[in-house]
Image: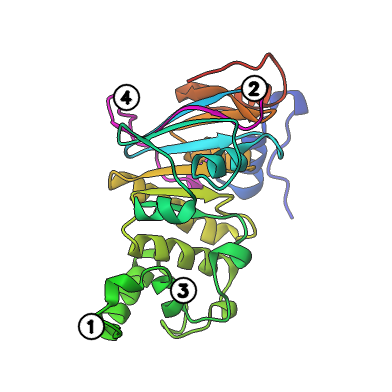
Amino acid sequence: GELIGSCLTSEVDNDRLVEMMVGRRIESSFPPKPQLDPSAASVIEVEELQLKKGGPVSRFALRKGEILGFAGLVGSGRTETVLAMLGAHSASRRKVKVDGVDTRFSGPDEALMRGIGLLPESRKEEGLITSFSILQNISLNNYRKYRKAHWFLDLKKELEHTTKAMAQVQVKAQGPYARVDTLSGGNQQKIVIARWLNHDMRVLIFDEPTRGIDVGAKAEIYSLMREFAAKGHSIIMISSELPEVIGMSDRVCVFRSGGIVATVEGDDINSETIMTNATTGRVEHVA
């Protein structure tokens, strides 16, 4: 290969190295961020959530049309906080409002009825039934929509909706009857997203959305997430990948020791601020 350039290590940052190696800055794989609307209504407000007695109390609001990033080291309490909010994990204090109304979910199924979908980190274990077809996976939990008479399903409508959802997320597959276990990781993740789009969700919670997915499919998933938010829906994105948190989040809640220690936006969404809050300093209770 040819020498592209040389520079002192003290004068180069990660992005510049990537730019020299790949020939483009890493931001180009992320869709442009829209201007934040500070007056946007809060869809979900967590007024207080404490996982364990004596632990930090998390407070945050998810606004309409935004992607809220959850950052922090593994074990910092990001996923547990989301599960506790949905009633699927124990909490010693929990006060949650949905559309300004006090709400106590008994689990993700109840949240689903309110238009809040959870896309777990493990697609295999919780997200998909891989031995089923794409059609069956996209319709899953949604058969009420297709009930024609007491026992009959409107299969034509089911196929129509599935084909539309597949086109929306640009699934690369033989067709709606292809088995999910024949697809790549990126296409499997798109099937999970297609299911929730078919559900008419307004809040999607992504846990490690691009883990184990190739770079090309990552960019497509990022575009899908931005399109979803642009429609006025909202996303909580839990991610251990710093470039993903920085490139995709409109605001970032940083977790440490079981709770949120800071919420940052604008120019503060950078690796230094996030990592400093994730690793050191006193535990603050930030809204």
Q: Nearer the viewer, residue 49 or 278?
A: 49
The answer to if 48 sits in the magenta stretch is: yes
Query: Can you name the residue that lies furthest to the left here?
Result: 149
- The amino acid marked with disc number 3 is Asn
- Contact (Cβ within 8 Å) of mark 1 with mark 2: no
Q: Earlier in the sequence, mark 3 or mark 2?
A: 3
Q: Nearer the viewer, mark 1 or mark 3?
A: 1
In 3D space, how far apart are the residues under numbered discs 1 and 3 (Cα atoms)?
A: 22 Å
Helix or strand or loop: what does disc 1 sit on? Answer: loop
Residue 139: percent from left, percent from top? 39, 73
Q: Quadrant of residue 89?
A: top right
Residue 137 marker: 3
In 3D space, how far apart are the residues under numbered discs 2 and 4 (Cα atoms)?
A: 23 Å
Helix or strand or loop: what does disc 3 sit on? Answer: helix
Q: Residue at x 49, y 51 (%)?
A: 107
Circle 3 packing at 10 Å, graded few (<14), some (14-19), many (20+), is: many
Q: Nearer the viewer, mark 3 or mark 2?
A: 3
Q: In the shown orientation, is residue 58 left or right of residue 32? A: right
Q: Which residue is mark 2?
A: 277
Q: Which residue is mark 4?
A: 38
Q: Residue at x 29, y 86 (%)?
A: 152
Residue 168, compared with residue 13, is above or below; it is below
Residue 180: percent from left, percent from top? 54, 77
Q: Which residue is mark 1?
A: 149
Circle 1 packing at 10 Å, graded few (<14), some (14-19), many (20+), is: few
- Contact (Cβ within 8 Å) of mark 2 with mark 4: no
Q: Magenta segment range?
A: 25-53
Q: Earlier in the sequence, mark 2 or mark 4?
A: 4
* Quadrant of image for the N terminus: bottom right
